[in-house]
Image (cartoon, rainbow, N blue to C red):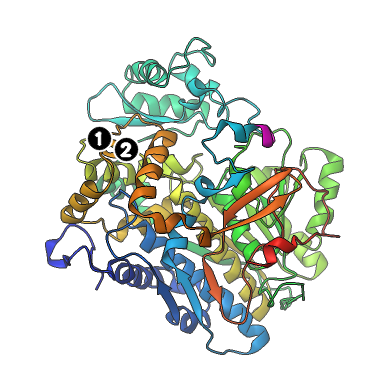
């Protein structure tokens, strides 16, 4: 039994037992398999059962949070490795092989963009900016006032909160509440928050929802878990598995894995598999990052006309090639369609329907599959899920965390009667892992029986899985509050994700230095950034195979749009 499955004291065990996280991870895995068993190959189940979890932790959980994030992501990584191992069986015949998941590294994966460095500078260091490609085209990130258009604020009614979200543009959201898109006079963190919250607090959540809907922005009312479960959308999503893999067509023949040889120390399971990643920010690119880790050739395709967060690319683009293509331009469309001819996987991280409007949605690609006689796997992730009344709403990690109850759970566990967005984009990375699993499942099915497959998952589905694991109880939270810096627990609802992350990092470096050890990191010179890039190593190991990245990171749009002549960075092969 898991040590903490909610606040029921009957489940209470001594918090300092070394196996607290291991026991919780086993329980999380059991729950995950129950929810996802129809969307996994049966051949993967013996491998998943054989996974060995390890941890250096001898005390309490890592994060100053009630959410069982380490347990959730470690269970997901075990499933990912189990499906990858089932793919390896297609070459080696089914055989027991050792699979290991390191809980420290799984935990670090959840905030890996905060651990990454370029030229020795991390995300918070302004000196990193000179090494980055400026993809913040509308200065939604680089100007503090505009950055705080994506933040949690109190509304007209006390106790009700709305997460305003300027997305990657900011002006629309600020104009919506009666503010200018630019305020050069506002440069102080607390002053920016006060001005924006003063304007948000003129409206009720219902008014903000209506205004938000009219301009198509990604804002949302901050709900408690019990309230989300009562919404029509919540009721729909609660009936869904964490990810789903459905058949698009069953006419194309089985497509065996290439198991292409490379210069790696051992074979890579996805060597020769080709992936087109049409994604931005974190969750979508984390899907492609996961596939690159197993050896897939991943091209991240971005539009030169769309914003992206510059520093996120340092971590997200490891192992890939990146290219800029404008899919509204006829010449770039032709280039993209040439890449599609031999692609095995398409990853879609845009708003629902965006790629359909461009002519590259899953149903539209079926014509290509039939014409070339080879199926494909299309995996789409979004914020709200792919079914239910809110499925077409735009959103990001903080939106999912606010609508599902994650933010309220965080705030209440901190002793507040208000929500606080939890530290780090953890639901982004968790969702990315679920998308990687969906892609692996689709590829396994395609190899066994042929056909094309559609995988779907979302940030909200990750949060549902997380919340259904239950929260750490009051006794555990009392221990965490005693261990961690009091500065962290002085955060309020309006503190930005940057401020929450900064304080969380500071206290975790002191309480859990094992998360920050060099053994978790790899470093390699990047031609794209013209500097050394340091990123986290793969979380899992599979006996007989090499998990790792073949090339250093690079900014978006760095490479030519071709599958030919890919480099291998030898420094990464030594890991």
132 is within the stretch colored magenta: yes
Q: Whole-percent x and y of residue 291?
A: 63, 63
Q: Residue at x 60, y 51 (%)?
A: 534
Judged by its main secondary structure, the magenta piece is: loop
**111 on left or right of 59:** right
Please provide the residue range marked out in magenta.
130-134
As measured in the structure, the alpha-carbon distance from the residue carrying label 1 to the one carrying label 2 is 7 Å
Identify the residue at image location x=17%, y=57%. Answer: 7
Residue in view at x 50 percent, y 31 percent: 217
Residue 233 percent location from the top left of the image: 38, 48
**Residue tagged by mark 2?**
420
Observer able to see residue 224: no
Mark 1 = which residue? 418
Residue 386 higher or lower than 370, as above or below = above
Q: Label 2, secondary structure: give it.
A: loop
Q: Residue furthest left?
A: 10
Q: Is residue 360 above or below residue 444?
A: above
Discs 1, 2 touching: Cβ within 8 Å: yes
């Amino acid at each position: 039994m898991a040590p903490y499955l909610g606040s029921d004291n009957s489940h209470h065990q001594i918090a300092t037992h070394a196996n607290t996280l291991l026991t919780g991870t086993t329980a999380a895995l059991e729950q995950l398999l129950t929810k996802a068993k129809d969307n996994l190959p049966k051949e993967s189940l013996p491998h998943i059962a054989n996974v060995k979890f390890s941890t250096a932790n001898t005390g309490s959980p890592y994060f100053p949070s009630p959410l069982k994030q380490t347990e959730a992501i470690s269970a997901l990584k075990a499933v990912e490795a189990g499906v990858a191992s089932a793919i390896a069986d297609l070459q080696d015949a089914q055989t027991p092989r050792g699979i290991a998941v390191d809980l420290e590294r799984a935990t670090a994966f959840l905030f890996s963009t905060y651990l990454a460095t370029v030229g020795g500078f991390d995300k918070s260091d302004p000196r990193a900016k000179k090494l980055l490609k400026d993809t913040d085209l509308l200065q939604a990130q680089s100007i503090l006032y505009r950055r705080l258009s994506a933040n949690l604020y109190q509304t007209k009614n006390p106790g009700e909160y709305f997460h305003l979200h300027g997305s990657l543009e900011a002006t629309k959201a600020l104009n919506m509440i009666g503010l200018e898109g630019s305020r050069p006079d506002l440069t102080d963190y607390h002053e920016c928050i006060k001005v924006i919250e003063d304007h948000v607090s003129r409206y009720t959540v219902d008014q903000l929802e209506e205004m938000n809907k009219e301009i198509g922005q990604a804002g949302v009312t901050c709900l408690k878990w019990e309230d989300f479960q009562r919404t029509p959308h919540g009721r729909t999503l609660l009936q869904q598995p964490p990810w789903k893999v459905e058949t698009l067509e069953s006419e194309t023949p089985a497509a065996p894995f290439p198991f292409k040889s490379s210069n790696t120390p051992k074979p890579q399971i996805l060597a020769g598999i080709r992936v087109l990643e049409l994604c931005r920010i974190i969750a979508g690119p984390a899907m492609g990052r996961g596939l690159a880790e197993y050896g897939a050739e991943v091209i991240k395709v971005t539009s030169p006309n769309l914003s992206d967060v510059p520093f996120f690319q340092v971590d997200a683009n490891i192992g890939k090639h990146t290219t800029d293509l404008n899919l509204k331009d006829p010449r770039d469309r032709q280039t993209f369609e040439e890449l599609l001819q031999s692609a095995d996987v398409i990853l879609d991280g845009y708003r629902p329907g965006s790629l359909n409007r461009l002519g590259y949605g899953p149903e539209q690609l079926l014509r290509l599959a039939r014409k070339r006689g080879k199926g494909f796997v299309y995996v789409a992730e979004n914020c709200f899920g792919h079914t239910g009344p809110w499925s077409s709403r735009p959103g990001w990690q903080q939106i999912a965390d606010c609508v599902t109850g994650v933010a309220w759970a965080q705030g209440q566990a901190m002793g507040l009667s208000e929500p606080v967005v939890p530290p780090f984009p953890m639901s982004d990375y968790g969702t990315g892992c679920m998308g990687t699993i969906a892609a692996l499942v689709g590829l396994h099915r395609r190899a066994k029986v042929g056909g094309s497959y559609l995988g779907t998952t979302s940030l909200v589905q990750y949060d549902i899985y997380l919340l259904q694991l239950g929260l750490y109880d009051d006794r555990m939270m009392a221990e965490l509050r005693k261990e961690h810096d009091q500065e962290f627990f002085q955060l309020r609802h309006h503190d930005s994700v940057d401020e929450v992350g900064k304080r969380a990092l500071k206290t975790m470096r002191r309480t859990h230095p094992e998360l920050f050890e060099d053994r978790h990191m790899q470093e390699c010179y990047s031609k794209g950034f013209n500097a050394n890039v340091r990123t986290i190593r793969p979380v899992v190991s599979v006996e007989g195979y090499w998990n790792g990245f073949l090339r250093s990171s690079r900014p978006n749009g760095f490479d030519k749009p071709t599958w030919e002549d890919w480099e291998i960075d030898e420094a990464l092969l030594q890991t």
